[in-house]
Image (cartoon, rainbow, N blue to C red):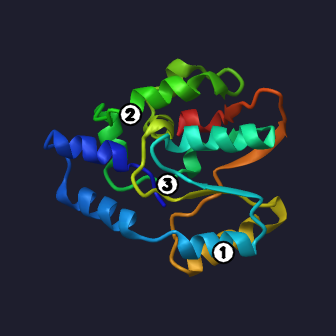
Amino acid sequence: KALGTGTLFAADQQKQAKGRWIEAAVESMLRSNRLAADCLRQWGATACTDVTGFGLAGHLLEMMRASGVSIVLDLNQISLLPGAAHSLGNGWLSSLHQRNVESAIASIQPQNSASYLSLSPLPQFQILFDPQTSGGLLASIPVAHTDQCLSALHRIGYTQSRCIGTVDAPADRPVVAVKPTTIAG
């Protein structure tokens, strides 16, 4: 599922959200993950979790620590609910957002010459910490099955499904490396 329920409902509390944004968020929240979970299992998912209150970064780090790996994350591939980028860009954040930043930021490293200062204002970066209500699933799929799995998910209606990252290497201390291409776009 696309991300952004935390920021959208924070905007709504401040009477800044458009009705269609909230309608899309509620529609997403009502969608069951059951068929997606079945599909992921069919394509060999080796790990899976739902994305909820700890945000994408928190749940991703849980999976990485359990697996002992680091990843390279492509922020451009993360799906956002309508209005989420606008809400994040205006600083309309859930009350849990800052806690999620503090819990995860030490494990997130920009690649190459990128800096946190260049990443931090980007909605695609801030969405990592947005707590979700009834969020989607985060799964690890063998690379050989990724394209077929995504096609199958799209066919059964999970059109926001994306490959957002790749396993980089085993690690004693898991690191989420953010691709530099995300900074320019």
User: Residue 114 placed where, x, y %?
Assistant: 62, 23
Distance from disc 2 to disc 1, alpha carbons, whole Å, reads 31 Å
Distance from disc 2 to disc 3, alpha carbons, whole Å, reads 20 Å
Local secondary structure at mark 3: loop
Query: Are dots 1 and 3 in contact, CB under 8 Å?
Result: no
- Identify the image quadrant of residue 57: top right
Identify residue type, mark 1. Answer: Cys
Q: Name the residue under label 2.
A: 96
Circle nearer the N terminus (2, 3) = 3
**Few, some or many residues within 10 Å of mark 2 (<14, 14–19, 20+):** some
Q: Mark 1 points at which residue?
A: 39
Query: Are dots 2 and 1 in contact, CB under 8 Å?
Result: no
Residue that appears at 34% across and 56% down? 82
Local secondary structure at mark 1: helix
Residue that appears at 63% across and 51% down? 164
Q: Which residue sits furthest left?
A: 15
Decide if residue 23 is on the left or right side of residue 152: left
Identify residue type, mark 3. Answer: Ser
**Few, some or many residues within 10 Å of mark 3 (<14, 14–19, 20+):** some
Circle nearer the N terminus (1, 3) = 1
**Few, some or many residues within 10 Å of mark 1 (<14, 14–19, 20+):** some
Q: Label for residue 79?
A: 3
